[in-house]
Amino acid sequence: MKTVNIKGKEYVEVNERIKHFRTNYKEWSISTNLEDLSEKRCVIKATVCDENDRVRSTGIAYEIEGSSFINKTSFIENCETSAIGRALGNLGIGIDTSVASYDEVANAIKQQNTKKVLSSDKFNAMLKAINEGKSNIVKSKITDYILSEQQQKVLNASLGQKDMTYKPSK
């Protein structure tokens, strides 16, 4: 299968995994299910079944609208593609070095390079949003920032969570 090099590692893109699957597993199927769609978040589960309709592998993907260039317009479609790629990877297709899809790896690298320190203005806006009952929005956005220990403690208390460390999202 054709690969793409990312930071010295070869990755098989999802389209290549799907072509391999369709050629070599003609009687098998891939299905997807929208597990969660709320605010600006999407979770999709992909399932690979054999010719007897037995589940052989699954893959779950989570995407946030606007978290990457492609997710500005197509976060649901991207989520489905990632879920399929993970299900095929879990089946053993295209995972010589990693189960992650090209998009997942590229997005993770981009996120590492684009983290911003949470400013006091943004921090105060998040606290205000929590007080207005918009905790889910804060939880989905907070992973885009680097937080101080104090900010983490205050947000944990405000969100009713204990000792959670917020890390950048994929």
Image (spheres, grey):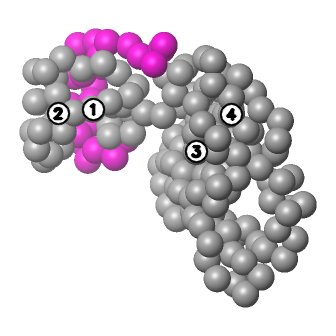
Residue 32 is left or right of residue 124, and the answer is right
Query: Would you name the residue on which mark 2 appears?
Result: 155
- Give the Cα separation between the discs numbered 4 and 1: 28 Å
Q: Which mark is residue 11?
A: 4
Q: Magenta segment range?
A: 112-137
Comparing labels 4 and 1, the label whose residue is closer to the camera: 4
Residue 12 is left or right of residue 33, and the answer is right
**Residue 111 pos. (x, y %):** 49, 22
Q: Which secondary structure lies at badge 3?
A: loop
Q: Which mark is residue 166?
A: 1
Specify which label sits upstream in the sequence, 4 or 2.
4
Q: Quadrant of the N terminus?
A: top right
- Give the Cα separation between the discs numbered 4 and 2: 37 Å
Helix, strand or loop: magenta stretch: helix
Residue 60 is left or right of residue 31, and the answer is left
**Residue 119 pos. (x, y %):** 28, 12
Q: Nearer the viewer, residue 3 or 82?
A: 3
Residue in view at x 17 percent, y 28 percent: 152
Instruction: Check whether the beta carbons of the residues at disc 4 and disc 2 lie within 8 A of each other.
Output: no
Instruction: Check whether the beta carbons of the residues at disc 3 and disc 4 lie within 8 A of each other.
Output: no
**Residue 11 pos. (x, y %):** 68, 33
Q: Which secondary structure lies at badge 4?
A: strand
